[in-house]
Image (cartoon, coloured by chain):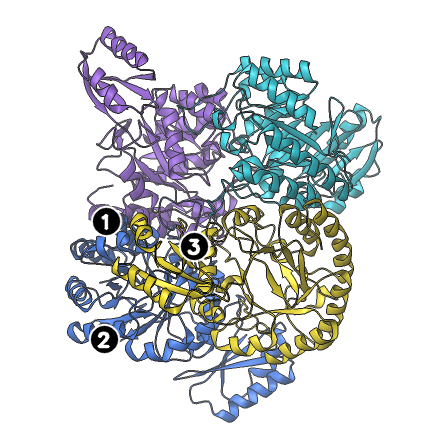
Chain colours: A blue, B purple, C cyan, D yellow
């Protein structure tokens, strides 16, 4: 059960509701948003009794019973789409937002070159990892803060916003100084301390689905971020692990309409990781937009064969440009624009 | 290694090649097509020696080494797309072919009604099962030949071609008398006796992917059909089984570009089984066409809630009509037409 | 709902029950066993009404409501373990029965040699495929009836019973003349025509689990055999397909206690296919017996590296002998014997 | 390539090797163990040249080429089993070590009661979570340090060693003050910052397999811990996620012989999480020991139906006692003891 307080409800009114719930034997969790305060009654089973007691209290706008285990992320609680502004680019609205760039930040030269190319083709956000989670401790682990500075420079030169990955709760303050969107990778989808930490920052968070996370577990992880006060979560489908090993992962395209049905959060697709091969990326990208995705996160590299990570699945700026033309046309058919 | 004989090669020339291969220690398999004869050298490892011995023989057009375990289905062997004619409708060419209809044939009335509706909306082929493979022996098992006669009547009244499932090698001759396309379901993808049997008939075969078949195993099953002399195999992706149970199966959208890369056979998508819920079918259908599929196989029912099987995943004729409009537009963007 | 008729119930009494059920609006399925007749009321929802109407009828022994979708195989219907006699060897009772032999019948010499070795070590049943389902149409497809004759000869010389695979409904009569147990492979677990066919023969059937079959689907496939009148189904866990590719399949060891809980049918384990490598077979075999399996089906070959199929996963007679010693000891600890 | 320096090799000798490798164009990673120093040449491809240059240098004992991506954990590098001492209990040696206790620390009373019971039955290590990773932010998250103090008290009263989970790199110093073994849960198997952190502590680490981690990825995560200088990693198989949902996870029993083949690290099994139901735990436990596991981690609770987490999969002290009797007997058969 979620209790939405009217805008302008006073602290006294909020406390009164809280006390009443306590009397009824339930715990509460308070979310203070910019406009309204929301009170989550945890584990509420006796809905009728709560409604009778709480609805008449001053300052209470409405009570919403939520059947799903995720509350703040559910469509029942928040029927309209959440639209997130990133330096003026709106994610989850009419516009489809394309994020593109190299897998990892390797050098100033490459990042700037790629940034300019993807900007020209219509991308709005530059991706690039400075702190890389790698399966092997002996692989390149990213440039760290030096990489963040390169991304910052690219933002200055191109006007693109920046998305980059956080892999440690300790590094969040540092990365939040540079990034416009904080990315949580698939491996950390259930690193709850990291989720809680980014939930306390005032930055949109892109939450990738774990390689074997169910849709419900994914929304529960988003809930960890939202429950700390940060409502701006972008979900990112990036393929799940199945028996099929011809592709690197299996893009679960169905998550797009399913998430749209269950949740109000924006959902975008990373076609590069499931493909595992650049030649399959255009096909998957077109499919994602046709299915209703709010955006894409694509690996683009000027020299894929020499990339320090994930080169095989990157596409060239030229292929990206060509793909964008198709995507613009498909966007129109599904009532969107790029 | 595949040896293609020139059109007009004589039996004597063919036998000479066969003898030479035998001398070299390999077995052969002969495929006599309408225009040309093809000789498959099984397990050929010593390519250079075979080439030197066979290339100069009279009637030999070319030798193609095939690295993949599937030979006749591989793009290496047959670089152009296979285009299959079903009563004049071409599958695998520029046109995208939509197959639609009820899961099972339940009554003359429903089948005719659905047939007229899907025809009107632009479908070219009517689907409907008369022999149903059901998980439970106590579920409705299909109307049998009576159902086939209803399909025949629908073809007469609408001009739609008919696709229907075969579940037993024994029934193939009966079903082939009525059907324009023989469908092999996911459960029978590795029922090799059934594959061999349909390989001996002169009817296109739609081969659904098994719920846990790798792409390679799927192409190997197609090879069973082709190796018996029937080149007209249509592959159908219908979702694979994964841990995610929110949808009935996981539509593996990536198979579309992958099959296009590996094979010359047409590939279509069944969006109804992976969705498991009609409300997700339009999104998956749009994605499939955007990804490059050659067609769709969609469950349409006038009264989904009372269907004897798979009602939940069927869409109404109205929803189908609306979907077709979107698909026609997306087809154009990918250089095709519906 | 299952109605068990008293032994000695007359045809008139049986028909009277059938008629009464029909009046109540349900269909029935009659199973005539050697001692008793059982009537299955299909889709019965109104249990109370059926009980009131049917229980008083003459010849009715008891009514059993079955909640699971599989009826005849459920532990609710048949609380005691089913024990199946194969030439005097009891499967599903106190004794653990070991089946061993080559993957496929390749030659008289090898089969007889292996048969003598496994007999000496304590195996009771000889395995060997004469009709082989192979992923590739170009692989060795088995010796056919000639292979069956070799198995027959091995039975005569060693006294071992014979288990061999059926892959086509058409071949069942032929194979049933030679085999003591008919084996249905994983690929055919949902080849319902084949299941129905073996259900009409008076031979025990070993039903392997499909590579992606749920436990419920597996029991439903067993139900197809039982519903045709053959109660003697032995379930065989042989590994499921997962993302892990280090082993050939993933042995789902948990099925042993789960099947024992849900069903009265015997369950045995094939450790060779999931292992995919002979060196892991002893460990998996010990685990299966410790977990409570009723038997094992192991690939043994005198010369694994030259086997025509599955050589890598076979073990030598020597390794088999050594393993049997361990298994005999573990059997005692779980209250069984080999 | 791994270079093992002789015991007593001087810093000068070590540096000389390092310099030589640098000249050859490779990076090195130095591991200073208690007795010997080991130098890992990262990405070494030109083995012959390295051997010729480095083998003659003073202080060099031997060079070991390692083909697997995990180096320090591979059986090639360290042929003998690693045996880890936890307060005198040896894990990975002849003895099989049983760890048991409640899922989470809920109260002093329950923990002490369970601790005494499992101690009596033969357990050597007490499990219990004070910091709990929970799918929902609204579920009980553990007692924190208060829980650690209860575990400490249980150790004092029973002499059992303590294993407890770490879920945040920030909390490692605190937990390391109380715990004898640090547990990394499945969700954090690829939380590399956490792995690096526990790698810098002088405490054995139990590393659970991620729900969809391949065996190779699991060993790579162990490598992260070892590469920081902590050689004492215990692997724990706890079930993988598959399509089968009858059990909570699928226990991958094959990992036991596979890990024993690939690595020298001890491997234990958690039968409670894959079972998801206490009634299947004894069967899986017996299987694990018969397969060759070095120990078990079992959830035991005095009142499973009222446990705050994972009650359904816990077994009672009585069931645990009975199970231990069987395990002791099976241990003997596989040449071990409990």
Q: Secondary structure at mark 2?
A: helix
Q: Is residue C199 left or right of residue A121?
A: right
Rounded to the nearest angstrom, the CA distance separating label 1 from label 2 is 40 Å
Which chain is indicated by disc 2? A
Chain letter of the residue carrying label 1 = B
Q: Which mark is residue D70?
A: 3
Which of the numbered marks, if any, corresponds to residue A183?
A: none
According to the picture, the residue beneath numbered tag 1 turns out to be B329
Point out residue C105 in the picture as x, y percentages from the top left corner: 54, 20
As rendered, which of B198 and B243 lies closer to the eye?
A: B243
From the top left corner, tell me how far across and down residue B240 is, in percent: 44, 44
Q: Could you tell me which residue is drawn at 58 percent across and 19 percent down?
A: C111
**Image quarter of residue B262:** top left
- Which is in the foreground here, disc 1 or disc 2? 2
Please check whether the numbered discs 2 and 3 fall on a single chain.
no
Q: Quadrant of the C terminus of chain C?
A: top right
Q: Closer to the camera, A251 or A112?
A: A112
Residue underneath mark 2: A152
Q: Nearer the viewer, mark 2 or mark 3?
A: 3
User: Viewed as shown, does residue C262 lie left or right of A145?
Assistant: right
Residue C230 shows in the view = no
């Amino acid at each position: 059960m979620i209790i939405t307080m009217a805008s302008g409800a006073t602290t006294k009114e909020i406390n009164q509701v809280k006390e009443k719930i306590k009397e009824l034997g339930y715990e509460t969790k308070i979310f203070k948003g910019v406009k309204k305060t929301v009170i989550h009654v945890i584990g509420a089973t006796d809905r009728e009794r709560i409604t009778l007691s709480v609805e008449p209290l001053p300052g209470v706008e409405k009570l919403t019973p939520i059947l799903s285990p995720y509350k703040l992320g559910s469509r029942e609680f928040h029927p309209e789409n959440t639209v997130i502004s990133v330096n003026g680019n709106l994610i989850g609205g009419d516009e489809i937002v394309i994020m593109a760039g190299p897998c990892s930040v390797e050098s100033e030269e490459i990042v700037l070159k790629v940034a300019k190319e993807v900007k020209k083709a219509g991308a709005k956000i530059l991706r690039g990892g400075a702190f890389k989670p790698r399966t092997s401790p002996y692989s390149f682990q990213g440039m760290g803060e030096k990489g963040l500075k390169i991304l910052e420079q690219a933002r200055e030169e191109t006007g693109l916003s920046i998305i980059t990955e956080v892999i440690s709760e300790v590094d969040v303050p540092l990365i939040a100084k540079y990034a416009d969107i904080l990315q949580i990778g698939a491996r950390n989808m259930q690193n709850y301390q990291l989720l809680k930490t980014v939930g306390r920052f005032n930055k949109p968070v892109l939450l990738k689905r774990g390689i074997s996370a169910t849709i419900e577990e994914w929304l529960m992880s988003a809930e960890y971020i939202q429950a700390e006060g940060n409502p701006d979560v972008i979900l990112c489908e990036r393929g799940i692990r199945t028996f099929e090993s011809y592709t690197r992962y299996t893009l679960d395209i169905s998550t797009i309409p399913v998430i749209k049905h269950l949740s109000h959060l924006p959902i975008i697709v990373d076609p590069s990781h499931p493909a595992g091969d650049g030649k399959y990326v255009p096909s998957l990208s077109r499919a994602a937009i046709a299915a209703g995705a709010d955006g894409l996160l694509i690996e683009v590299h000027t020299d894929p064969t020499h990339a320090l990570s994930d080169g095989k699945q990157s596409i060239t700026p030229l292929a990206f440009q060509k793909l964008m033309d198709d995507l613009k046309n498909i966007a129109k058919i599904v009532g969107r624009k790029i």
